[in-house]
Image (cartoon, grey):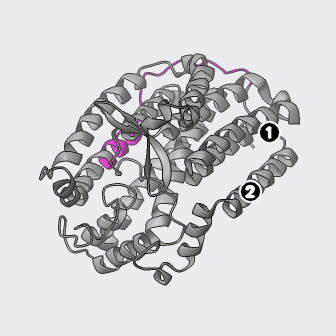
């Protein structure tokens, strides 16, 4: 485990230099994602938006431009001040997600495919509160771990119980939403942060076992999740029902071959493949760009994730290290989950692909997180740049 110079956050002289490889990789993924989204979405948009084939890409483009502006502004913001937003962001995320049980307000929640995960915002569209929860967990866990210090983090009382309680609260809220993937992502982020923050290995393993046991209990008690596990093992047992998504995704990937059918030439996106602009956008990418195109995109994601962890390792400030690791882990876990789902390696979970899947607020938050990473990169001493 990495040792830090002190328990409290260490302020170092800000170099003023953002990490240019991270910035370029982010913009590259954003550009490729927008191109692929337009190709994957125009058929569905034409069918559902009164013939407006550009509906999804126009809305996503607006959020992309706004997200880039937010990213650049946050890259110049002193991330140490995010300590002050840790608890407020946590309380806000819990309050918003708890509205699913409040009469009147719960009518604004949207149910799709038997899962209630979205809130309808008049004039804007739908918003997934779990996106806010991910940011809140990263900020809160990083702040608490840095403030508690190594000695407290090594104890059960300070290093495990408060963090476990927070994960438990979000797990209950997401249980109501039927959002297993969101719970898994938050648990993965939280456990990584407290491990780096200095949690005792024994209590950490015990807590991880508890999280795993809770996941098994959830699946066994939740028919929705159990059915997804069963159909994942063999989607062709019900190819016209529950297995439809998995079957159509695999057909899209298989028909792409090595070189692909060509950009814009996907057949499965023409109302065969569900959610071609969202959870299954990478299936369309594989069909149109083939194995080579998909592999290159995965390589860019891998480079982005590597660069994020590089910044975390080079930062001398404990809070900055934990923030960078948490943000990077969120991108990494969501990417792995999405790619695993579309290829059939994992059960269908509803995890979107960062920078690619349609969702304006999610894209805005992801770019804001990249801005925080860029801000952290400014604190890397010149002697440690490379």
Q: Which of marks 2 and 1 is nearer the N terminus?
A: 1
Count of marks overlaid on the render:
2
Give the residue drawn at x 26%, y 33%. 65
Quick check: 210 above or below 265? above
**Of 135 and 381, which appears nearest the observer?**
135
Q: x, y percentage for residue 196?
A: 71, 40
Q: Would you say 110 lies left or right of 208 here?
A: left
Q: Would you say 205 lies left or right of 339 here?
A: right
Q: x, y percentage for residue 382?
A: 50, 28
Cβ atoms at labels 2 and 1 below 8 Å apart: no
What are the residue bounds of the magenta stretch? 6-29
Q: Say what secondary structure mark 2 lies in.
A: helix
Q: Which of marks 2 and 1 is in front?
A: 2
Quick check: 7 above or below 228? above
Q: x, y percentage for residue 231?
A: 54, 74
Q: In which quarter of the image is residue 246?
A: bottom left
Mark 1 highlights which residue? Answer: 199
Quarter occupied by the N terminus? top right
For this orientation, the residue located farthest to the bottom is 237
Q: x, y percentage for residue 128?
A: 45, 40
Q: Can residue 317 be seen in this view?
A: no
Quick check: 239 above or below 357? below
Give the residue drawn at x 61%, y 18%. 11
Q: Does the magenta stretch include residue 331?
A: no
- Disc sitting over residue 15 in the figure: none
**Of 132 and 339, which appears nearest the observer?**
132
Mark 2 highlights which residue? Answer: 212
């Amino acid at each position: 485990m990495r040792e830090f110079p002190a328990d409290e956050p260490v302020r170092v002289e800000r170099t003023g230099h953002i990490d240019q490889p991270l910035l370029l990789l982010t913009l590259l993924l954003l550009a490729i994602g927008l191109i692929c989204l337009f190709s994957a979405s125009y058929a569905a948009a034409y069918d559902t938006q009164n013939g407006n084939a550009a509906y999804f890409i126009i809305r996503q483009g607006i959020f992309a431009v706004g997200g880039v502006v937010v990213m650049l502004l946050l890259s110049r913001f002193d991330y140490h001040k995010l300590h002050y937003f840790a608890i407020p962001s946590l309380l806000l995320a819990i309050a918003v997600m708890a509205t699913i049980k409040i009469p009147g307000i719960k009518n604004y929640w949207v149910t799709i495919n038997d899962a209630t995960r979205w809130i309808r915002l008049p004039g804007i569209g739908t918003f997934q509160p779990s996106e806010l929860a991910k940011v809140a967990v990263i900020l809160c866990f990083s702040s608490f771990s840095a403030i508690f210090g190594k000695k407290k983090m090594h104890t059960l009382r300070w290093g495990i119980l408060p963090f476990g309680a927070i994960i438990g609260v979000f797990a209950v809220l997401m249980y109501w939403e039927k959002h297993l993937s969101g719970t898994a992502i938050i648990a993965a982020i939280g456990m990584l942060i407290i491990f780096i923050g200095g949690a005792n290995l024994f209590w950490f393993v015990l807590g991880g076992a508890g999280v795993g046991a809770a996941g098994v209990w959830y699946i066994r008690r939740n028919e929705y999740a159990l059915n997804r596990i069963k159909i994942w093992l063999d989607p062709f047992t019900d190819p016209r029902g529950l297995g439809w998504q998995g079957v159509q995704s695999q057909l899209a990937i298989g028909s792409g071959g090595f070189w692909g059918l060509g950009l814009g030439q996907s057949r499965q996106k023409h109302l065969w493949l569900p959610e071609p602009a969202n959870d299954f956008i990478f299936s369309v990418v594989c069909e149109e760009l083939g194995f080579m195109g998909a592999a290159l995109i995965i390589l860019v994601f891998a480079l982005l994730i590597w660069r994020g962890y590089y910044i975390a390792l080079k930062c001398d400030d404990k809070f900055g290290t934990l923030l960078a690791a948490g943000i990077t882990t969120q991108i990494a876990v969501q990417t792995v989950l999405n790619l695993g789902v579309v290829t059939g390696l994992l059960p269908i979970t509803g995890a979107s692909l960062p920078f690619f899947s349609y969702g304006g607020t999610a894209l805005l938050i992801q770019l804001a997180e990249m801005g925080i990473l860029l801000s952290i990169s400014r604190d890397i001493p010149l002697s440690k740049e490379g």
